[in-house]
Image (tube, rainbow, N blue to C red):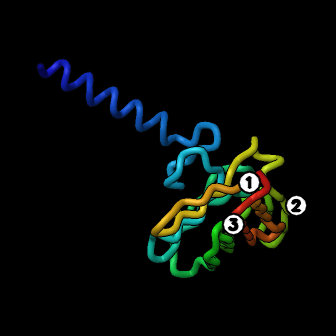
Amino acid sequence: MKKWFGFGLCLMAAVLVVGWSGVGTSFAACPVVGCTVCIDATTSPPSCTYLDEDGDPHTVTAATLDAKLAVASSDTPNVNAYCKDSIVRDAAGAAGEKGPAVGFDTTNTDDGLCCIVTTTQTYQTNDWSETVSGSGNVSLSCHFPGTE
């Protein structure tokens, strides 16, 4: 019995590590599997998962994060969400130097989606863009419905 219990724990740990490790476009920080970037309005303050200048996921949940969510009710909801943050660019080199600006969207992230998570629904959209400026200012914008 102990052997099977130990095997079950190891199997669960392996599933968690593989499923939440950031393989492909699913990241542990975003509560929705299959999303490349995410704006989660269910947390207080909201959290935002975006890509850094190297394309690696970065999540921030802080009172200083500038995140907005607007939902217009209709037969087809219209949802606009954005978040802005500032990161230290590792590609910038010496202090005061800037790196090149980097942009991400559906076309250059393996058809990744932006997920907008509200307390009532989760919206997945391919209508999103993100820019990381040379000085490390990050701006992520998502709109639903997208252009699916």
Q: Earlier in the sequence, mark 3 or mark 1?
A: 3
Q: CA distance from mark 1 to mark 2?
A: 25 Å
Secondary element type, mark 1: loop
Q: CA distance from mark 2 to mark 3?
A: 13 Å
Q: Which quadrant of the figure has residue 124?
A: bottom right
Other-residue count near label 2 (Cα within 10 Å), few / some / many at <14 / 14–19 / ≥20: some
Is disc 3 in contact with disc 1, using a CB cutoff of under 8 Å? no
Residue 98 is labelled as: none
Residue 100 is labelled as: 2
Q: Position of residue 45 (x, y in %)?
A: 48, 77
Secondary element type, mark 3: loop
Give, as a three-letter code, the residue at label 1. Answer: Asn
Reading the image, the residue beneath label 1 is: 126
Q: Position of residue 108 (x, y in %)?
A: 82, 47
**28 is higher (above) or lower (below) than 79:** above
Residue drawn at (51%, 80%) of the image: 63
Q: Position of residue 85 (x, y in %)?
A: 66, 73
Viewer-side label of 3, 1? 1
Residue drawn at (76%, 51%) of the image: 148
Residue 88 is labelled as: 3
Q: How many marks?
A: 3
Give, as a three-letter code, the residue at label 3. Answer: Val
